[in-house]
Image (spheres, coloured by chain):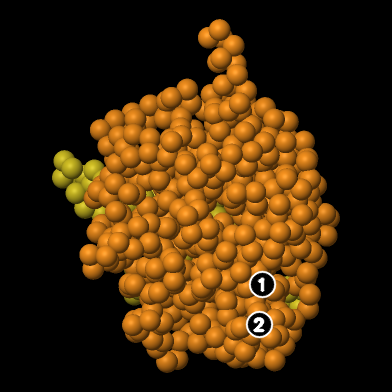
Chain colours: A orange, B yellow
Amino acid sequence: MKVVLALFLCASAFGQVSFDRIANADKEPGNWLTYSRNYQGHRFSPLDQITTENVKRLRVKWAYQFPDSTNEVSPIVIDNIMYVTGPNSATALDAHTGRILWSWKRPLPPNFRSIGFGHVSRGPAVLDDKLYVATLDCYLVALDIKSGVERWSSQVADYKVGYSMTLAPLAIRGKIMVGVSGGEAGVRGFVDAYDANTGKQAWRFWTVPGPGEPGHDSWQGDSWKTGGGPTWVTGSYDPDLNLVYWGVGNPSPDWNGDPRRGDNLYTCSLLALDADTGHLRWYFQFTPHDTHDWDSTHVPILFDAKIQDRPRKLVAVANRNAFYYVLDRVTGEFIAGRPYAKQTWAKGLDPKGQPISIEGTETTEKGTLLYPNANGATVWFSPSYSPQTGLVYVAVREIGALYFKRDMEYKAGTFYAGGGENELPVDDAWGAIRGLDATTGAMRWEFKLHSPPWAGVLSTAGGLVFSGSDEGNFYALDARNGQALWDFQTGGAIEANPIAFAVDGEQRIAISADRVLYIFGL
Amino acid sequence: MPPAWFLTEDDLGNVAAYVRSLGKIAPEPLPGNAAHGAVIFAKAGCANCHIFAGAGVGFGPDLTKIAVQRSPSHLKAAIRKPNENLPEEFLLVAATTASGDTIEGIRVNEDTFSIQIKDATGRFHSLRKPDLKDLQKLRGQTPMPAYNGTFSDSELDDLIAYLASRGKP
């Protein structure tokens, strides 16, 4: 009887990841069921076997070599099986050993061009019995989770005009959501939702409003048609409010704002969208009329805290423009904000959270020296929020650049950026992991890095913060004070987000470094 | 090299045309006497820090092809005032260990947790940064002496003619 029951449990658990399981992620600390582990975008693991005391004993348990270099994947782990993605590919791995269980690959069209980004995939999504993959040539593909066989495939947009997808989809109740890249190709951005079972489009929200829509007057002439506003990083979700929070990227052309006078809504903004209809509940624009490529494409962190003794539902964003923001996530009201990295473009924020820009900081023909550089004070890689410490951990880039603008005509499917930047010399740039008070952004501690990082941050209930460096260091810090407790040289640049999971109850930490996925355990 | 995804077809053509134009800079004459230059090279002890045509100590940059890579005027300036003409990635560092020893040399690699240094004997030191008492980055400094005033202009011509001979004066 026991054997039969065990088999039944195994079969029911395997491949059936309901919405409720994901929404209650904390009930399954050993699994990692969505991009940031929970819908709130925390990238925090409740696992506490690896601690500040024993982390020194961490060692490699297995490694997996990807077929392609430079992997940015954040894996999904369900009941001892790990799912990873690469460019137009997905693979299921035995989480005990790293051995391949199945692989799926879709050939890239020969005329596909990456305009402004690498050939990467940041991870899959899972819902019920399907794994969802967003492809570079802009298809959302549903795979049978047990075999990797395609169930359906829906074209999201036409890659030939510059659209692409590098992000992990977001699976919520009955729907799969995706956003697009293409901010350097003059696309018109959007957030899409698809029926999880059929692949039929449920709704689309255009991030650049068309004629007659609110916000359209923030664009000059026909500039909205090529206005950018890509949506290339996975959003967060509040199941109680049924609101999806999604960041919007830069206006196009990136560095020349002359052809697109105005605030250029909803570029460089955070959107709160009704998950059922895609209707805009509120928006908050961080960088109006951006001319520095400061996409607001970050994982929004949803948390609740008391502000002046009143419990509030909040959303926090450490923005590419070097300011940290706290907003009311019901209304979008600005609560707090301050710089968390060196910036030389704004005097500060006004009472509504809008930047008080410094004159002469727009890009010029000759070049304008400014902090941060175009990759920003942080960028797509994830922050982490620990409910234990109340801190938001951000991987910070301290680097400036000489920005310049150029005249450029739009031609579909080609680079449309109107300028560029010259970064400062390598030795003048550095990086850090910073622990920020979640409600104010005040820095509590800092761990300095040799160079600006490209890796996200994981925090755990073991009191640890994990991240990686561009020189290949994977390391653990004390979440309370930033003290380095352990490090490992992986041999490849780390440009990915770490995760934590359990194999048969034993905690593991995973990180991709260039073309190798490392799994660590005690 | 990072991919130049931001360049249009026109930009690529312009960059290629510029690179081609670089080869059209008129070569500088080499008036020196290479045989005499070999004597100066030996007398100055250049091989104590540099490998040239297979001989010497591998501490400073390899000089075997230096006269192909750099113009005579640049080489003269670098010999006279080496600290004003440092290679882009060159950095002299001084690390003080927990026991108080100081290791000075060229940084050959560095990350957040470790630094690798080559000292004047060519020996490598691998050091954990958290264990160091002090780590000084001696920007603008070099272990190479300045020969400004040591050699006459014609002696420098001879030395550069010797470097251009790749060891076969």
Give how far across and how far down residue B30 sits, in percent. Answer: 59, 73
In the image, residue A358 sits, relative to residue A299, either above or below, namely below
Q: Are marks 1 and 2 on the same chain?
A: yes
Chain letter of disc 2?
A: A
The residue closer to the viewer here, A285 or B152, is: A285
Give how far across and how far down residue A225 sits, in percent. Answer: 72, 81
Give how far across and how far down residue A6 sits, in percent. Answer: 55, 15
Residue receiving disc 1: A206
Q: Between disc 1 and disc 2, whose residue precedes?
A: 1
The residue closer to the viewer here, B55 or A202, is: A202
Q: Residues within 10 Å of mark 2 (few under 14, many from 20)?
A: few
Asked whether the residues under the numbered discs 1 and 2 touch, taking CB atoms below 8 Å apart as contact, a structural biologist would say yes
Q: From this viewpoint, is residue A492 visible?
A: no
Q: Is residue A333 left or right of residue A21?
A: left
Closer mark to the observer between disc 1 and disc 2: 2
The residue type indicated by label 2 comes to Glu
Q: Residues within 10 Å of mark 1 (few under 14, many from 20)?
A: some
Residue receiving disc 2: A213
Q: CA distance from mark 1 to mark 2?
A: 10 Å
In the image, residue A302 sits, relative to residue A248, either above or below, namely above
Secondary element at tag 2:
loop
The structure residue drawn at horizontal position 31% and vertical position 37%, both measured from the top left corner, is A462
In the image, residue A505 sits, relative to residue A135, either above or below, namely above
Q: Is residue A240 left or right of residue A386?
A: right
Give the quarter of the figure containing the N terminus of chain A. top right
- Name the residue at the right extreme: A110
Secondary element at tag 1:
strand
- Name the residue at the left extreme: B100
The residue type indicated by label 1 comes to Trp
